[in-house]
Image (cartoon, rainbow, N blue to C red):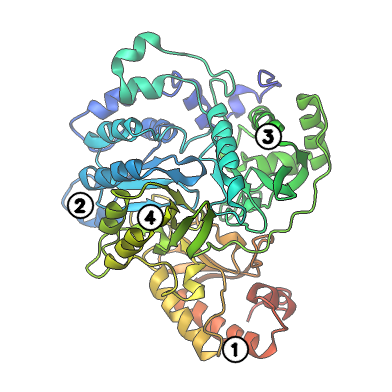
Amino acid sequence: MSEFHPPQPSPEKLSEAEYLKAGSNYLRGSIVEALADPLTASVPERETHLLKFHGAYQEDDRDLRNERAAQKLEPAYSFMLRVRATAGIVTPAQWLVLDQLARDCGDGTLRLTTRQAVELHSVLKWKLREAIRRVNESGLTSLATCGDVNRNVMLAANPDLPQIHPPLCALANEVASRLLPRTTAYREIWLDPHSAAERRDEEPLYGATYLPRKFKIAFAVPPSNDVDIRTHDLAFVVVLADRQIAGFNILVGGGLGTTDGEPATYPNLAVEVGFCRLDQVVQVAETVLAIQRDYGDRTNRRHARLKYTVNDRGLDWFQAELRQRLGWDVEPPRPCPLLDRGDRYGGTEAGDGRRHLTLYFENGRIRDDADRPWMTGLRAIAQVHRGDFRLTANQNLIIANVSEADRSQIEGLVAQYRLSDGRDQSPLRRNAMACVALPLCEMAMAEAERAMPQFLTQVEALLAEAGIPDEPIVVRMSGCPNGCARPFVAEIGLVGKAPGHYNLFLGGDFAGQRLNRLYRENIELAEILEILRGMFQRFAQERQPDERFGDFVIRAGYLTTPPG
């Protein structure tokens, strides 16, 4: 099944990235030589692409670019290292390693991502090998957290039925393990250079050119859609029967990244293609990935995700191809409604006398501030906690499986270090997300993480002015159209267009089952706030019982008439 490769485009039509991967010697390239170059803090452009497969993005501090250029200095280069946490699970011991690494090799902060991974920022080239080695010694890895491969496999963080989380976590780990690259380049470069004698120059699943683009998988557990299930290339939604796992609905073709000015690129929601049993999930995952490997667009990277493969060839074609490769037919999908996507803040029962405690971290950034020593607080908790940590898809963290004997100590540390369980935040802020954007992301066109807190404060004031201060509207902000904060499925989505300017999207639904639409293009935050002021006033006066803001925007006609 995974060995099948249909004819590919003629060589002159392949994108440059395809040549780069084919000539990389299975992701080795000249990474070792680039790391050893003492004359620059950067690596050559070719190696920046290959390093992504190993989990590292080259970045520079864009706040300092002009100043350093005036001084005839190269940009302030460093690397973001992304660490894989399958299903969002990290042990306290692993957390302590990440905490120490952030202080030894990074900028002293950790960032929780929207895909249940952890990022260390501002890692200098000279410390990159040490950081990756220590990550792996802890039992974690940065392999395949970036690049044209399957990324971190996500799982609902806190299902209503605690007993189903362990088998789902085991399944997510099995899928993740099956879809990892097999090249030994990672081990040779970062962990054990002497292992080159045992090198492996083959990729039984991926082949020498890997996938056309990245591939993302997630598992959702109704009624929660905390992982935004329809935004992934491949998704599995748990179907329950008598409070047990009966199987999974299979969804394919999600993805939010788009490119300004290119109508052939667009955000897309995954669609249901069938139902499978628990013991069939791994085969389905490998088969869907192999279809994308063989038929994904290798001529245009901006048109290379599975969503385009499915839409260009048709859903009927995809289902027939899936059936042929599996050797059996999936069953029809089953009803399983998804009602919300927020985290369950505060304490929840975990069973067997244990509890979970979900903590809020604005935009996923964990640092020590004068009034919020959150990094130190989590370090103190990790030193005594005997359960685990769970990273959520909403950039928060769960202190999971706290025993009754440890509960008072954990809660005491939460209070001592002024960690937030979300109750001191507005519903609006609890549901909001922003990507990193400036100053470190090379793709950012505008601010996101640094602009979002003040923007939300202003939106909170508008909601209070309209008499609806506790309305839990989903607001998301991304610094560019890649959409890492998933803004295209928000009720209010802001996507960076230029410094200080955003495209305003409206009309997504509260549960994440509908794309929003462009309302105004290339406007400043002040104008966005004025637009929202009028809409909130009307919403407060004209809303129907239990109507959400995203639904009201559509019913009121804002998206069917040209905006004023």
Query: Circle 2 sits on which residue?
Result: 68
Tell me where residue 396 appears, x and y as whole percent: 44, 58
The alpha-carbon separation of the residues under discs 3 and 2 comes to 51 Å
Closer to the camera, 171 or 144? 171
Residue kind at label 2, given as amino acid type: Arg
Instruction: Tell me the residue at 69%/19% (across/down).
Output: 4
Element under label 2? helix
The alpha-carbon separation of the residues under discs 1 and 4 comes to 49 Å
Query: Circle 1 sits on which residue?
Result: 537
Instruction: Tell me the residue at 56%/52% (across/down).
Output: 259
* Nearest to N terminus: mark 4 or mark 3: 3
Tell me where residue 89 appears, x and y as whole percent: 46, 44
* Nearest to N terminus: mark 1 or mark 3: 3
Give above or below for 533 relative to 416.
below
Residue 375 sits in quarter:
bottom left
Residue 77 seen in this snapshot: no
Residue kind at label 3, given as amino acid type: Val
Element under label 1? helix
Residue 543 sits in quarter:
bottom right
Residue 429 appears left or right of 10: left
Query: Circle 3 sits on which residue?
Result: 281
Query: Circle 4 sits on which residue?
Result: 405
Element under label 4? helix
Count of number-bearing discs: 4
Residue kind at label 1, given as amino acid type: Gln
Q: Nearer the viewer, mark 1 or mark 3?
A: 3
* Nearest to N terminus: mark 1 or mark 4: 4
The alpha-carbon separation of the residues under discs 1 and 2 comes to 47 Å
